Amino acid sequence: MNFYVMTLFPEMIDAVMRESIIGRAVQNGLLSVKTYNIRDYAFNKHSRVDDYPYGGGAGMLMQAEPVWQTYEAICRDAGCDALPVIYLTPKGRTFSQDHAAKIARLDHVVLLCGHYEGIDERVLEEIVTDEISIGDYVLTGGEIPAMAVIDAVARLIPGVLHNDESAETESFSNGLLEYPQYTRPEVWHDRSVPEVLLSGHHANVEHWRHMEALKATAVRRPDLIDPETLTSQELEAVSDILKR
Ligand code: 6GU
């Protein structure tokens, strides 16, 4: 899996991608994250990449040509005629686990980080294949969203997570939020670990975890639950919560 990030702040991405699980995966050759500074592809001697919007208004826009030249350089490096380009913008579709899974199947993907008030629409029309937002709030640029996308996709690539970090059992992989977890000591601040977890009865533990996950989801994210798909026992456990 090869990520190519078009940005005005490559150091931001490079620094984060060296750390932790993603850093280890890059070291192990399971993924690559290559940053391209759009300013390096400015076509004027002052390395300017922004200009005033036609029609007036506040703020500056990123010009089309440096973005285009950066994209062309990436295509040359990747040895491809064209590449999928995801533009990180608050106008995009909200990023989800499904979206991450689809991206994880690609060999190459370009992430375009906007800054200023936006990017000249014409280069977006020519190169962008998908637009992603990471939520309904506005950030100063697309770098943090790009890193969120890389992180969510990377952990789905086989080998990136070790067995004890498995992607399987966590929030969203089964459409539910995570069940509560406990480690030693057995009693802390007068709070005991739920009895069933000490029982050694694997099936009971699994059942308890499933019901806790379902209840947590009903309380926090009822929008993730379709009551039609629940068994009568599940429905009984959450119907009061869902009615609230
Ligand atoms: Cl992708 N970009 C910016 N600038 N702000 C955001 C965002 C993206 N997603 C949520 N807020």
Image: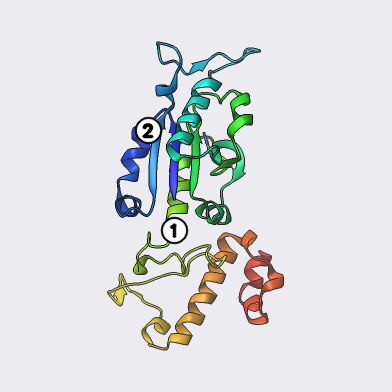
Q: Of discs 2 and 1, which sits in the foreground?
A: 1
Label 2 CB-ligand 1 distance < 8 A: no
Closer to the camera, 83 or 124? Answer: 83
Q: Is residue 148 above or below residue 117?
A: below
Which residue does the image show at 53% across and 26% down from the upper left? 68
Colouring scheme, one of rainbow, by chain, secondary structure, one colour: rainbow
Residue 120, image quadrant: top right
Closer to the camera, 35 or 17? Answer: 35
Residue 5, image quadrant: top left
> What residue is pinned by disc 1?
157
Residue that protrudes farthest toward the left in the picture: 185
Mark 2 burial class by Cα count in 10 Å: few <14, some 14-19, many 20+: some
> What residue is pinned by disc 2?
10
* Image coordinates for residue 134, horizontal then vertical, percent: 53, 44
Would residue 48 be found to the left or right of residue 22 on screen?
A: right
Closer to the camera, 219 or 60? Answer: 60
Mark 2–mark 1 CB contact (< 8 Å) = no
What element does badge 1 sit on? loop
* Image coordinates for residue 72, horizontal then vertical, percent: 49, 30
**At label 1, which amino acid type do we have?**
Ile
Which residue does the image show at 37% across and 33% down from the upper left? 10
Circle number at residue 140 = none
Residue 144 showing in the rendered view: no
Q: What is the count of numbered marks?
A: 2
Closer to the camera, 69 or 235? Answer: 69
Residue 222, image quadrant: bottom right
Would residue 153 be found to the left or right of residue 93 on screen?
A: left
Residue 127 showing in the rendered view: yes
Which residue does the image show at 47% across and 28% down from the upper left? 70
